[in-house]
Amino acid sequence: MVSSLKPKTTPIRSSKIVHKSSTLHPQARFVSEDAVCVMFRISFEDIYTIECWRYIVYVHGKGLSKFVSYADFTPIIGVGSPTAQDCIKWRKRWRKSHDYAHKKHAPHWWAEFFTCQFAETASESVLQSWWQLIGLINFAFSQETLQQLRHSYQQVKVGAKHSGD
C-alpha cells in the first residue's frame, strides 16, 4: 500500500546563510531561511543571501533589502534550547514594538512559522520536538495564539496517525 506519493521531507538545497563575522552572535543559531520566508512573506527562491554580521542580520532578496535583529528570529529545533539570555533579548525586542497590543508577545508571524513547521514535519518525533519548543517559550504567545497553535499541532498529529495506518 502506497501511503503518499509526495514525500514530506525537504529537498536538499544550498544554504543562503553566510556568516560575515569571525565572532558569531549567540542567537545566530536561530537564523533560518524558513523564518525569513515567513517574516517577509517571500519564497525561498526569492532570497538571494542572508548575511549574519556580528550584531545584525542583512537579508537581501527579490525586492527586499533589510537589516534584521537577531532577536527577531524564532527559536528552532536542532540547535540548542533557548537560554534565559535569549528570552531576555526577545522580550526587550518586543517591548520596542510600535504596536501596543503586541509589546508583551512575539510578532504574529512567529505563530505562522510554527504552524508551517508542524505541517512540514516528516515524523511524529520531530513534531513532538516542535511542540516541546513551544512549551519552553509559551510566554511568547497570548492564550488565544497558544490555543491556535495547539489546534494546529493536534490536527497534524491526528493526520500523521491516520496516514500511518
Image (cartoon, grey):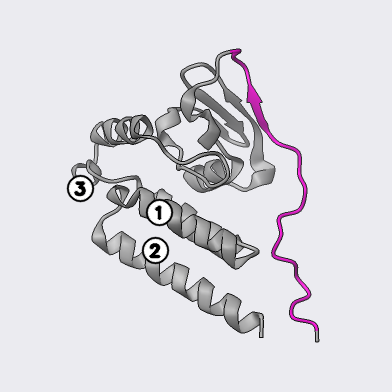
Does residue 34 sit above or below 59 in this rendering? Answer: below
Local SS, label 1: helix
* Mark closer to the observer (2, 1): 1
Residue 134 counted in the magenta span: no
Q: Where is residue 10 in the image (x, y as percent from the top left)?
A: 71, 55
* Image quadrant containing the C terminus: bottom right
Q: Position of residue 32 (x, y in %)?
A: 57, 39
Q: In this view, does 39 lie to the left or right of 164?
A: left
* Mark closer to the observer (1, 3): 1
- Residue at x-position 62% and y-position 48%: 43
* Image quadrant containing the N terminus: bottom right
Q: In which quarter of the image is residue 4?
A: bottom right
Q: Are the residues flagged by discs 1 and 3 in contact, CB closer than 8 Å?
A: no
In this view of the protein, which residue sits in the foreground, 116 or 101?
116
> Disc 3 marks which residue?
101
Does residue 140 sit above or below 153 in this rendering? Answer: above
Q: Which numbered disc, 3 or 2, marks the residue that appears first in the sequence?
A: 3
Principal SS element in the magenta part?
loop
Q: Is residue 142 left or right of residue 111?
A: left
> Disc 1 marks which residue?
134
Please name the amino acid that badge 2 sits on. Leu
- Residue at x-position 48% and y-position 44%: 39
Q: Which numbered disc, 1 or 3, marks the residue that appears first in the sequence?
A: 3
Query: Does the rendering let one see residue 59?
Result: yes
Q: Residue 116 carries which label?
A: none
